[in-house]
Every structure is written in structure tokens, then in C-alpha cells.
Image (cartoon, rainbow, N blue to C red):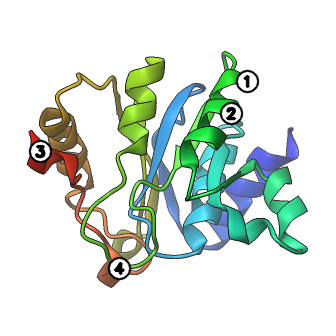
Amino acid sequence: MIIRPKLARTLLWATRWKLVGQVPQRGILVGAPHTSNWDFVAMLAIAWSSGVQPQVLVKESFFKGPLGPLLRALGGIPLDRSNPGAAIRAMLAQADESFLLCIAAEGTRSKGEYWKPGFLRIAQQTGLPVSMGFVDGPTRTMGMGPTFVPSGDVVADMDVVRAFYADKRGFRPENRTEPRLREELED
């Protein structure tokens, strides 16, 4: 859709946010730090500015009521947290050459202890690369960082993620969760 890139660029210009990097056409897009409800809008602005329409996993409860049709139109996919695998398998079965899935790896807007491992698991199972999107409130910068193909070594892969997100703070820095997975303790 031609209007989305113009709308996103105008919104970023009007709010004086700097956009960096290029959104890939395919893969798993990590949106972090996830510290605010505005992160959804930010990730859409990042993707739309590059002419890309990602699919976004959103907690199922947000789809109840009048917000549901809007979220679906924006690429939202309801995620039942009690059975996330079913929704993800159904979505991946329909994935094509331009499949881009945006995941908030922190899983919550509040400060937590660990990130959710879904982004790495999906990438490893599908062979899709992981691209790191970000929002940094203190510098008013958002955009895309590097893309990598997970090696299967969880600690090494998360070291790449940690290095990139080390100086990214989100909209509400006090809610930022350090990039680490519970699975790293098991290795």
C-alpha cells in the first residue's frame, strides 16, 4: 500500500524521531526494548517506512471488542498464551517469500527477568533470519540493527543480541528487561 510508507515517514518527521536501518522483507523481527504500548506503533512505523507489512503477535485479550478488527488490519495475530505453539504453527504454515513476523521478545511491557525464547526457536525451526528492531527513547531513534542466522548455540546467539541492545532503552527505560533467556542457564 503506497500510503503507509508516506504516513509512517510523516509521523516520524512530525514527532522528531530519527529512523535508521532498513527493514528486511523476510524473517523474524525482534521489537525491543518492549517498555510501552507505543512500541506496537513504533514497529509499524519502522516497517511501513520501508514499505513492509509485518505480522505481529499480540496478546489475544487485546482482540476482544472494537480493537480486534483494527489490530487484524494492522497485521496483528491473536496469541493465546496458554497454547502459543498452535497459533504460531498455523501462521508459519501460511508463510510465503515475504513473511515477516514481529515479536516483542520481552513478552511484557513491564520489567522482567528474562526474554521469551520464541524468536530464536521459530528462527531455528524455519531457517528464517533474526533482525533486531529497536526503539531508544533517550536518543529519539528507532529502526533496524543487524540481521543474523541463529547458530543453535543459545549463549552465543544471545551474546549477539545483548551486544546490539546494550545501549537501547525503549520509551520507558525503567521497564527495560536485560536480553537474556532462562535457557542460557541450562547450557
Disc 4 crowd rating (10 Å Cα; few below 14, some 14-19, many 20+) is some
Q: Distance between the residues labelled 3 and 2?
A: 29 Å
- The amino acid at mark 2 is Met
Q: Residue 147's x, y, as percent? A: 37, 30
Q: Name the residue under label 2.
A: 91
- Residue at 84% across / 64% down in the picture? 68
Residue depth check, mark 3 versus mark 4: number of the one nearer the observer:
3
- Residue assigned mark 1: 94
Q: Is residue 56 left or right of residue 34?
A: right
| CB within 8 Å, label 1 to label 2 | yes
- Tell which circle, 3 or 2, labels the residue nearer the N-terminal end: 2
Q: Which amino acid does label 4 sit on?
A: Asn
Dot 1 or dot 4: first in sequence order is: 1
For label 4, the residue is 175
Locate residue 54, reporting x and y percent.
66, 41
Q: What element carries label 1?
A: loop
Vertical placement of residue 128 versus 10, above or below: above
**Where is residue 152, by image quadrant?**
top left
Q: Mark 1 vs mark 3: which is more N-terminal?
A: 1
